[in-house]
Amino acid sequence: RRMLKKSSGQSLIEVVIAIGILGVALVGVVAGSLFALKAARISRERSVARLLVDKKIEEVRIVKDKDPEAFFALANRTETETNETQLAYTIKTTYTTQIVNQTMKVAVEVTWIDGGIEYSVEQNTILAKL
């Protein structure tokens, strides 16, 4: 009887299994990369929104400092404006009297939509007439 030599090459099954494992690994890497890119984009959008909130709060402070009477005349109002950069950010500013003609709460909310999901950043401050 002759002894059969062991095959030193790869069988078709081994190659198919190796390709399958590599395919699953690549899908995981691609999915992880897409998730990281989306998280980075949303973080950048949130930073832009935070800057818009800060800018609006500063504008309101300037109005209060220049003309307190005009500022307190804004009591119990809401203003809405749009800032179009790469996305359309909506800036909503609400003025609420805390102590009549003495302090006013100013709430600034910036909203935007990305991928069908609405995001927002909000900040409140209370400004006093000095």
Image: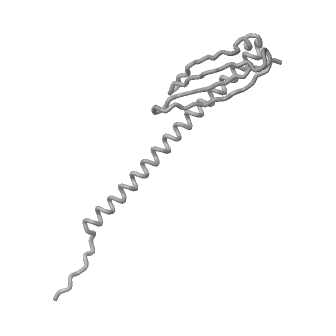
Q: Position of residue 55 (x, y in %)?
A: 66, 24
Rendered residue at 78%/15% (across/down): 100
Which quadrant is home to the C terminus? top right
115 over 94 or under it: above or below = below
Q: How is the image coloured?
A: one colour
Toward the viewer: 27 or 125?
125
Toward the viewer: 50 or 72?
72
In the displayed image of the protein, which residue is found farthest to the bottom?
Answer: 1
Q: How many labels does the image show?
A: 0
In the displayed image of the protein, which residue is found farthest to the right?
Answer: 130
Q: In which quarter of the image is residue 17?
A: bottom left
Q: Where is residue 50 in the image (x, y as percent from the top left)?
A: 62, 31
Rendered residue at 64%/27% (across/down): 53
On the rendered structure, is 119 left or right of 103? left
48 over 38 or under it: above or below = above
Q: Position of residue 94 (x, y in %)?
A: 65, 20
Rendered residue at 68%/16% (across/down): 76
83 over 115 or under it: above or below = above
Which quadrant is home to the N terminus? bottom left
Rendered residue at 59%/22% (across/down): 91
Q: Position of residue 29 (x, y in %)?
A: 43, 51
Q: In which quarter of the image is residue 108?
A: top right
39 over 88 or under it: above or below = below
On the rendered structure, is 43 left or right of 61? left
On the rendered structure, is 18 left or right of 130? left
On the rendered structure, is 63 left or right of 18? right
